Amino acid sequence: MKTAQGGINISILGKDLMVACPDSERTALIAAARYLDDKMREIQDSGKVMGTERCAVMAALNLANELLELRKQAANVPADIDHRLQFLRGKIDAALHEEIL
């Protein structure tokens, strides 16, 4: 991955692309490009998908599915944590109440 003024040159399946990117986001962009390249190579190596465009669409669908699953899991975490905190708060209140009596 090469950097150029105002952008960065990334490589996906051997094809170089110049992408505009703020300096603060270059590391993340490079990581994302490598991740995408790896996913597309996995799909291409499976031999089930022909053509770069179709491979890109399949990779995009797989990544979108991963993202949606992670969002779904993240949405469930706060509710679970909130439930646990309420349970612990109740136990603490009960213990304090017993000490007062």
Image (cartoon, rainbow, N blue to C red):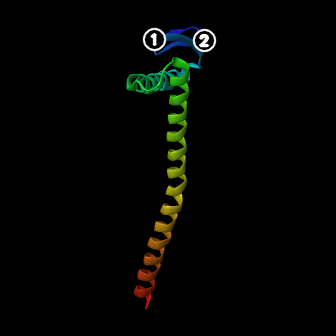
Indicate the secondary structure of the residue bearing disc 2.
loop
On screen, 25 above or below 9? Answer: below
Residue at 55%, 44% (x, y): give it. 68
Find disc 2 in the rendering and name its residue.
Answer: 6
Q: CA distance from mark 2 to mark 1?
A: 22 Å
Residue at 44%, 82% (x, y): give it. 94
**Crowd band around label 2 with a 10 angstrom C-alpha radius: few (<14), some (14–19), many (20+):** few
Q: What's the residue type where badge 2 is placed?
A: Gly
Give 19 or 72, whichever is nearer the viewer.
72
Indicate the secondary structure of the residue bearing disc 1.
loop
On screen, 53 above or below 68? Answer: above
Q: Quadrant of the C terminus?
A: bottom left
Which one is in front in this view, the residue at disc 2 or the one at disc 1?
1
Q: What's the residue type where badge 1 is placed?
A: Gly
Find disc 1 in the rendering and name its residue.
Answer: 14
Give 28 or 95, whichever is nearer the viewer.
28
On screen, 61 above or below 79? Answer: above
In percent of width and height, residue 86 lies at 50, 71
Count of residue discs: 2
**Crowd band around label 1 with a 10 angstrom C-alpha radius: few (<14), some (14–19), many (20+):** few
